[in-house]
Image (cartoon, rainbow, N blue to C red):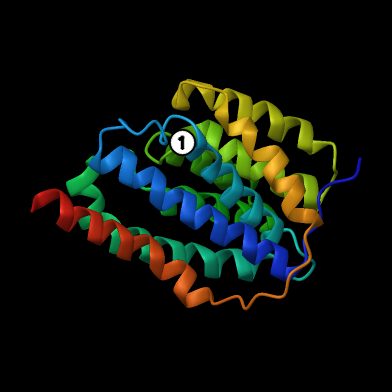
Amino acid sequence: MNLPRFGDGSLTGMKWLAVVLMIGDHVDWMLCGGELGFHATIGRIVFPMFAWAFAYNLARPGAREQAAFRSVTRLTLLGLAAMPAYVILSGVLPLNIMFTLAAFAAIVAMVERGDTFPAVVTFVVAGAVVDYAWPGLAVCLSLWAAYRYDSRWIVAAGFSLAILEVINGSQWALAALPVIAVASMVRVDLPRAQIAFYAVYPVHLTVLAIAAVL
């Protein structure tokens, strides 16, 4: 089974598109109460796009246990940095998406190290408190397994995306699939700008939180 493959530039472009859509989604959800209709529809493709890009990177040759643990640290710090604004806008639970991705990276690191039982425990415990819960973690893990081990895991990824209806209230997450497919066909030369990419999350939430309280 052939999976979408990405050049560095196309993967960066897809992530920045997801960032733009995420900001629009959060404006609608956190400031407008969903009245714009964006959060319930196109905003639902944001998480699958981030999950796909992150899983693809963690499955790259050489991006094994150490890379996953570095990601855990980075994502946890970003999640904590965003928490004050996130609590104002949405409340404490579920924990923001950075913690979802951090839990995914932690599970990957454990699996790579052969620590299956701690990985299962992390999946069960983290899934109870992070955004998108167990279906979200399952999306990430099945995508990673598809690129890391066997492409047939992509079936589980599609199934997990469909299960997100329990959280999203719709099947809009599946609309990410054609966007991801097109992104894999585009060849562009874009700088990674990794620091700016990560900074967007806590910064934009802080701006929204200030707007919400004024």
- Give the residue displayed 24% in from the left and 60% down from the top: 206
Q: What element carries label 1?
A: loop
Q: Which picture quadrant has residue 183? A: bottom right
The answer to whether 8 is drawn above or below residue 210 in the figure is below
Q: Mark 1 points at which residue?
A: 132
Q: Residue furthest front?
A: 36
| Location of the N terminus (image quadrant) | top right
Disc 1 residue crowd, few under 14, some 14–19, many 20+, Cα 10 Å: many
Residue 38 x, y percent position in the rendering: 42, 36
Q: Which residue lies furthest to the right in this view?
A: 1
Q: Which picture quadrant has residue 184? A: bottom right
What residue type is disc 1 on? Tyr
Q: Nearer the viewer, residue 101 or 7?
A: 7
Q: Is residue 115 left or right of residue 96?
A: right
Q: Which of 156 and 25 is in front in this view?
A: 25
Residue 8 x, y percent position in the rendering: 72, 70
Residue 6 x, y percent position in the rendering: 77, 60
- Give the residue displayed 40% in from the left and 70% down from the top: 199
- Give the residue displayed 70% in from the left and 35% down from the top: 157
Q: Is residue 92 visible?
A: no
- Give the residue displayed 46% in from the left and 34% down from the top: 133
The answer to whether 105 is drawn above or below residue 70 in the figure is above
Q: Nearer the viewer, residue 59 or 38?
A: 38
Q: In this view, does 54 lie to the left or right of 198?
A: right
